[in-house]
Image (cartoon, rainbow, N blue to C red):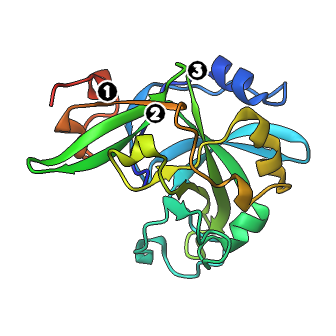
Amino acid sequence: MCGRATYKLTWEEIVALYRLTLGQPAVNTRARYNVCPTTTVDTILDQKGKRRLERMRWGLIPSWWSKPLKDMKLATFNARAETVATKPMFRSAFKRNRCLIPVSGYYEWQDTPEGKQPWYFTARNDSPALTIAGLWDEWKDKASGETINSCTMIITEPNKFVAEVHDRMPVLLDEKDYEPWLSGKSGLELLKPAAENVLQKWPVSRRVNSSRAPDDDPTLIDKVKI
């Protein structure tokens, strides 16, 4: 799974990396080192030929959900590539609502005799972003009338490099895949493990094991000895 991430992108980097349509007002960004499910994340949408940044809840709420949000007990921050096209929670969004979810890196946990050891994964070529294939949907709370846009990250089997730590990894898209994914021209064929040379990793402090670790603490991604 991918249940914790970092985000250090500037507005200028986002515009350049994702070729956002010009004329959008700049969005204030801040470095976050402990991005957790149900918090707000940045996504990239392409609608009617216009590519823009949209902030959403991380944890997809399908448009057909009829109960209060507090009654959603399922974890929907990740969608498995193997079932994303058929599982009721995600299949509608897979057909019509694609997005890109940029992160600077993400955490995974390795089971060890001493407990769960977190590892930090980021781009090996020092790119400021990893781009995860995502889905989104729009849900309206019938009680309050509030509309919430939400998203999920798609995960798949790990490559050998990631498998040294964990049994799943996010689907990482190359720039050439952005348009086919967003437009729906391509689908399941893109949902595969990344090449072995895409990521680098190192062990980090177990302080990040807590979702309450401050997300403005850059030392969370410092390498530690194990």
**Considering the image in quadrants, where does the C terminus appear?**
top left
| Contact between labelled residues 3 and 2, with CB atoms less than 8 Å apart | no
- Answer whether labels 1 and 3 touch (C-beta < 8 Å): no
Residue 66, picture quadrant: bottom right
Q: Earlier in the sequence, mark 2 or mark 3?
A: 3
Q: Position of residue 177 (x, y in %)?
A: 76, 42
Q: Is residue 168 left or right of residue 194?
A: left
Secondary structure, mark 3, is loop
Nearest-to-viewer mark from 2 and 3: 2
Amino acid on which the number 2 mark rests in the picture: Gly
For residue 64, above or below residue 119: below
Give the percent coordinates (x, y) of residue 12. 67, 17
Query: Mark 1 and mark 3: span between their CA atoms?
Result: 18 Å
The x, y position of residue 16, in whole percent, is 73, 21
Residue displayed at 57% across by 28% down: 129
The Cα–Cα distance between marks 2 and 3, rounded to whole angstroms, is 15 Å
Q: Which residue is mark 3?
A: 10
Residue at image point 41% right, 34% down: 121
What kind of residue is marked 3?
A: Thr
Kindly check if marks 2 and 1 are in contact, taking CB atoms under 8 A apart as contact. Answer: yes
Question: Under tag 1, what secondary structure?
Answer: helix
* Residues packed near mark 2 inside 10 Å, few (<14), some (14 to 19) or many (20 plus): many
Amino acid carrying label 1: it is: Ile
Give whichever of 125, 17 is nearer the camera: 125
Looking at the image, residue 155 sits to the left or right of residue 99; the answer is: left
Residue pointed to by mark 2 = 105
Judging by the rendered image, the residue that carries numbered circle 1 is 221
